[in-house]
Amino acid sequence: MPPDPLNVLAPHGPKRRAPTTAQNERYTTTKTLELVKKLAGVNTFTLDVAGCVESHKAPKWYGWQDKARTPSLFLDGLKLPWGSTKSGMAALATVFCNPPFTEMEAWAAKAWEEIAKTNGPALIAMLSPANRTEQPWWHQLIEAKRDKRMRGSPLGETLTTRFLPGRTRYGCMADPEGLEAGSPPFGSVLLLWRR
């Protein structure tokens, strides 16, 4: 059966659906979160932009707000701000994001959009599958911009990449820590935007 065309790479259009498939709902385990925090140099995150009620990694989160997956209770992290909502105020938000892997291009573009805002977050830590590095979006949004300061930007945003060791284990609703599940057939990379 071909993938649902309304659920693949149409993040900003009116037909975008909230991700519901097992392919897109990978919970970040405690072990992985601790490694991410260490690599990001933070003790905690203030916002999880792609969480759910069962597995959010910050006190405030976007995503599913209830276990029943009620569409009206879905807060879309691709459409909501990641920093301060007050104009002109610098945000101190530290953002965590384990996005739906079928929508990586949209989430990477959103991270650049948010980090460049005057009131955007100070840090964005995003997990990505490491087997997407040959795709055009990776070369445009990640490879061309990583490990250097953005010229001409008053905020001096940077993007660094850290490939995580081995294959990252992910959980699911029935097994949040991924104790019974095997790891996916690919590694993971941590994308870190800072200002």
Image (tube, helix red, strand yellow):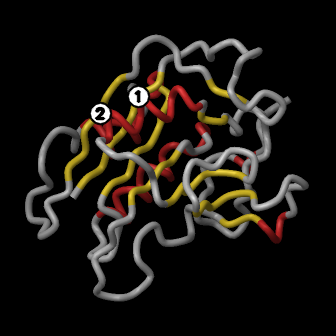
Helix, strand or loop at label 1? It is strand
Q: Earlier in the sequence, mark 1 or mark 2?
A: 2
Helix, strand or loop at label 2? It is strand
Residue that badge 1 annotates: 189
Please indicate whether residue 29 sits to the left or right of residue 122 in the image. Answer: right
Amino acid type, callout 1: Val
Tell me if residue 121 comes above or below residue 90 in the rendering.
Answer: above
Q: Are marks 1 and 2 in contact (CB under 8 Å)?
A: yes
Please indicate whether residue 151 sits to the left or right of residue 45 in the image. Answer: left
Residue that badge 2 annotates: 161
Locate the C terminus and report the quarter of the image it occupies. bottom left
Outermost residue, right side: 68
Report which quarter residue 112 is drawn in. Answer: bottom left
Amino acid type, callout 2: Thr
Is 170 or 156 nearer to us in this picture? Answer: 170
- Residue beneath the point at 47% across and 24% down: 188
Outermost residue, front side: 43
Is 14 or 47 nearer to us in this picture? Answer: 47
